[in-house]
Image: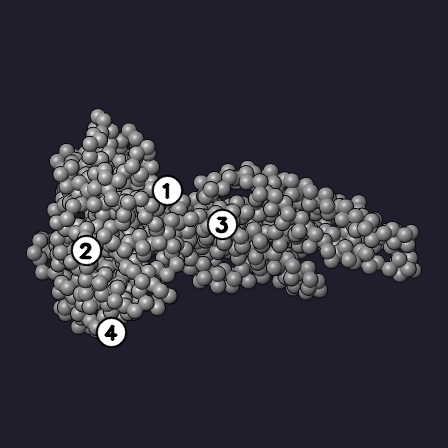
């Protein structure tokens, strides 16, 4: 009953001061909501368990290659090595493989791309993925020549088959191969990739994807296992390491140096999916919102201290009639709790809306877990974890901003306060603490402004860096024909037809094909040798970027040929092998010579793969950024004609005369004229790919800009409150000064003197803090120094502007004081 009485009293008191109450609630709501949004992102990307039963027992298994130069590197597995692994480990209740591929759903009016996982027989069982109908794969499905079967995702079953209950046993065509539907997965299950719409057994891989899937020595298959209940991670790691060494002795992986050592290891799957770039960016945002939350709490504490000065007379009366200090402190804490509770409620509303709009960019969340072998599973939601976080933060903020003001307010001189009430800021014990709090707010806000300024400068330099090509009016997409139908011997004829049909589309200027688009991480590489220049003993051949392109390639990109010639239509199979290189290759391998006429070959390549099959350099092209700008974008590039060798899976780049998006429908029709089973995958304009390539910097900078803006606004509110209170408390003195002839400038200097010191102290401390914390951002900055003087100068200017804006209204009030009215009251 007493608590209810305290709550009613608190509500009544807060409603009597609506301006104070609104300011406090807005401050806390912004701080708590922003921290909830960032926690939602961090939780989704780093903390939340993966959506699989018993995910803490799921481990990713990798081959390890340890060398003297690169240290330990993780690799995936070949199918044959995976079979040996299954035979050599006992720590796992189930162990399974998967690889990701996009297949075309054919036999329909318009071919549709479908993300698919190629899996071993125990995959769905290992993940404890229930089927709503049908049966799982069995060991017989791994045998080459087994009848092709497919398990559909629940979404694909509903979308393409209208949730028909008799779907099992029916047929569906993927990449032109007929599969029998054996089952349907449960709702929400999309495999370890987080994207799969269907699952097919490894025996079908050679028919729809990679012809040598079961026989190649390449390590491209991901392996996951579920630990037995009685086995620890350390025990499993030791067993897998030993098994990896035995497997290497039986079926060696390719070594880079003679000193390389091979074994294997395990890693909890939730840890394996997390990229260091993701962690770094989210930890930066976490630190920023902690600072913001402290600023919000400090702001409310400052408001409470100011209100406490006004309430000294009231509190003195309550103490005089017998209220103990503990009773009054409790009542003041109840008021703080009400403020925190209301703010938390509004923060949840803001967070729910924000989490629906905020996403971690794919380039930040995915990444280096082997080309996205594992899904990001990083979509934030307002779940019980975020709600619990808001409740916890609300409780902590009550203590942070409520306790000190409550104790300070109740430390009263009863007789003095009964006589004088609350007069003046000067001499008040709370004034010094309040000013210190405002200086702290300013300092913390400046730290965030400096960090934000560094990221803004970095981002600005990133997006204005020359790319070496003209991204405007370029449409890009992938085609993925089945290799069993289009092996390399037949691929160039298919690409001929595709490019010819597209070139006939009205509005197309030029068209080319490549293995990748600029600003991506998908380009092929190869070890390059120069004919007549043998490598010294122990020296590895340099790895370069490889491209199989059309004659119009450099025309499509808008990249000039600087020397020699481009690839021509006559450069076809049966004609002399030719290659165009980029400036970087010329600088690196022929720094003081003309590369035109030199010959090169590529180690282990199916074409141009020996000195006798070498290619002559016929031209040098301008450098093009084929990798993201923060990932060493310019690599030595070697461009050979696709007509002399290519694979069928290609990236197609179309230069349009106008809006490239307007061509998508006509281009898709043209591609189907070349082959009716072809679909367009990953359709994007080149400008969209460019934005995607720096989306992680954009997202980080935008979020920090919002956080810094809120922090600066809250700090400015604190400056406003202190200045306004000081002006109100010295109104009589100001009136006397005006009556004695003081100018407006002197009144302004007098009124600002106290808060100007706060700004100077807070700004200086913030600059020093920014210099220290900016070192944490060093790895996230592009072509920007952590001590960039322009950024620090701009941060200082922003602080001065915010300070003057916050002081403008109180200053106007000071200069509008009527001395006659003030003296008459006296």
Percent x, y of residue 507:
32, 67
First in sequence, mark 1 or 3: give its number.
Answer: 3
Q: Is residue 406 above or below residue 197?
A: above
First in sequence, mark 4 or 1: give its number.
Answer: 4
Q: Quadrant of the N terminus?
A: bottom right
Residue sitting at 17 percent across and 52 percent down? Answer: 572
Q: Is residue 687 above or below residue 586?
A: below
Seen from the viewer's position, the closer of residues 208 and 295 is 208
- Of badges 4 and 1, the one in the foreground is 1
Q: Is residue 354 above or below residue 167?
A: above
Q: Is residue 453 left or right of residue 382?
A: right
Circle count: 4
> Is residue 284 visible to us here?
yes
**Residue at label 2?**
648
Q: Quadrant of the C terminus?
A: bottom right
Q: Give the CA separation, mark 3 to mark 2.
A: 38 Å
Residue sitting at 15 percent across and 37 percent down? Answer: 611
**Residue at label 1?**
632
First in sequence, mark 2 or 1: give its number.
Answer: 1
Could you tell me if the residues under marks 3 and 2 are in contact, i.e. CB atoms within 8 Å? no
**Element marked by disc 4:** loop
Residue placed furthest toward the left:
145
First in sequence, mark 4 or 2: give its number.
Answer: 4
């Amino acid at each position: 009953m007493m608590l209810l009485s305290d709550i009613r009293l608190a509500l009544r008191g807060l409603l009597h001061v609506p301006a104070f109450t609104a300011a406090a609630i807005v401050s806390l709501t912004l701080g708590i909501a922003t921290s909830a949004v960032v926690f939602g992102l961090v939780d989704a990307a780093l903390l939340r368990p993966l959506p699989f039963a018993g995910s803490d027992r799921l481990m990713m298994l990798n081959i390890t290659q340890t060398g003297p130069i690169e240290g330990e590197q993780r690799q995936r597995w070949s199918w044959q090595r995976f079979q040996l692994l299954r035979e050599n480990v006992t720590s796992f209740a189930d162990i399974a493989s998967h690889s990701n591929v996009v297949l075309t759903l054919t036999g329909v009016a318009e071919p549709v791309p479908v993300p698919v996982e190629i899996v071993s027989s125990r995959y769905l069982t290992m993940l404890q993925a229930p089927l709503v109908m049908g049966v799982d794969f069995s060991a017989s499905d791994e045998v080459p020549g087994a009848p092709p079967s497919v398990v559909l995702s629940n979404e694909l079953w509903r979308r393409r088959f209208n949730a028909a209950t008799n779907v099992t046993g029916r047929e569906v065509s993927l990449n032109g191969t007929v599969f029998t539907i054996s089952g349907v997965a449960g709702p929400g299950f999309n495999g370890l990739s987080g994207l799969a719409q269907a699952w097919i057994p490894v025996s079908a891989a050679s028919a729809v994807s990679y012809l040598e899937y079961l026989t190649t020595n390449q390590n491209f298959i991901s392996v996951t296992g579920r630990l037995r209940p009685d086995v620890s991670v350390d025990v499993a790691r030791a067993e897998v390491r030993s098994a990896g060494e035995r497997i290497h002795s039986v079926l060696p992986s390719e070594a880079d140096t003679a000193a390389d050592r091979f074994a294997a290891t395990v890693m909890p799957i939730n840890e394996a999916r997390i990229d260091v770039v993701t962690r770094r960016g989210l930890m930066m945002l976490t630190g920023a919102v902690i600072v913001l939350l402290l600023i919000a709490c400090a702001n409310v504490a400052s408001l409470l201290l100011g209100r406490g000065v006004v309430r000294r007379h009231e509190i003195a009366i309550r103490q005089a009639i017998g209220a103990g200090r503990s009773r009054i402190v409790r009542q003041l804490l109840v008021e703080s709790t009400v403020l925190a509770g209301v703010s938390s409620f509004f923060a949840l509303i803001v967070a729910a809306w924000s989490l629906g709009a905020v996403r971690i960019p794919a380039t930040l969340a995915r990444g280096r877990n082997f080309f996205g072998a594992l899904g990001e599973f990083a979509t934030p939601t307002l779940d019980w974890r975020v709600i619990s976080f808001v409740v916890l933060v609300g409780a902590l903020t009550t203590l942070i901003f409520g306790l000190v003001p409550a104790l300070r307010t109740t430390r009263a001189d009863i007789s003095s306060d009964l006589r004088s009430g609350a007069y003046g800021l000067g001499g008040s014990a709370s004034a010094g603490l309040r000013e210190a709090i405002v200086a702290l707010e300013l300092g913390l806000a400046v730290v965030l402004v400096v960090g934000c300024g560094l990221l803004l400068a970095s981002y600005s330099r990133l997006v204005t860096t020359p790319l070496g090509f003209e991204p405007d009016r370029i449409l890009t997409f992938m085609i993925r024909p089945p290799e069993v139908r289009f092996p390399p011997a037949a691929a160039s004829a298919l690409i001929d037809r595709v490019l010819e049909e597209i070139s006939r589309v009205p509005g197309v200027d030029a068209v080319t094909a490549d293995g990748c688009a600029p600003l991506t991480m998908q380009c092929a590489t190869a070890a390059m040798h120069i004919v007549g220049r043998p490598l010294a003993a122990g020296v590895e051949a340099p790895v370069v970027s490889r491209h199989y392109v059309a004659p119009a390639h450099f025309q499509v990109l808008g990249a000039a040929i600087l020397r020699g010639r481009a690839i021509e239509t006559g450069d076809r199979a049966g004609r002399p092998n030719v290659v165009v290189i980029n400036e970087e290759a010329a600088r690196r391998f022929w720094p003081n010579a003309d590369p035109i006429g030199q010959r090169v070959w590529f180690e282990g390549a199916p074409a141009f793969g020996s000195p006798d099959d070498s290619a002559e350099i016929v031209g040098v092209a301008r450098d093009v950024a084929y990798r993201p700008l923060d990932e060493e974008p310019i690599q030595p590039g070697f461009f050979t004609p696709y007509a002399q060798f290519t694979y069928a899976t290609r990236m197609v780049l179309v230069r349009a005369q106008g809006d490239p998006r307007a061509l998508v429908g006509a281009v898709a029709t043209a591609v189907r004229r070349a082959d009716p089973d072809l679909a367009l995958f990953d359709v994007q304009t080149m400008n969209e790919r460019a934005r995607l390539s720096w989306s992680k910097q954009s997202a980080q900078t935008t979020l920090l800009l919002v956080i810094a803006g809120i922090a600066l606004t809250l700090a400015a509110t604190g400056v406003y409150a202190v200045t306004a209170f000081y002006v109100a408390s010295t109104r009589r003195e100001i009136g006397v000064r005006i009556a004695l002839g003081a100018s407006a400038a002197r009144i302004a200097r007098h009124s600002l003197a106290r808060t100007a010191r706060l700004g100077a102290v807070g700004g200086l401390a913030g600059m020093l803090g920014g210099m220290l914390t900016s070192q944490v951002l060093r790895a996230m900055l592009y072509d920007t120094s952590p001590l960039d003087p322009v950024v620090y100068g701009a941060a200082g200017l922003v602080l001065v502007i915010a300070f003057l804006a916050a002081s403008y209204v109180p200053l106007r009030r000071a200069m509008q004081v009527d001395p006659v009215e003030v003296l008459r009251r006296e």
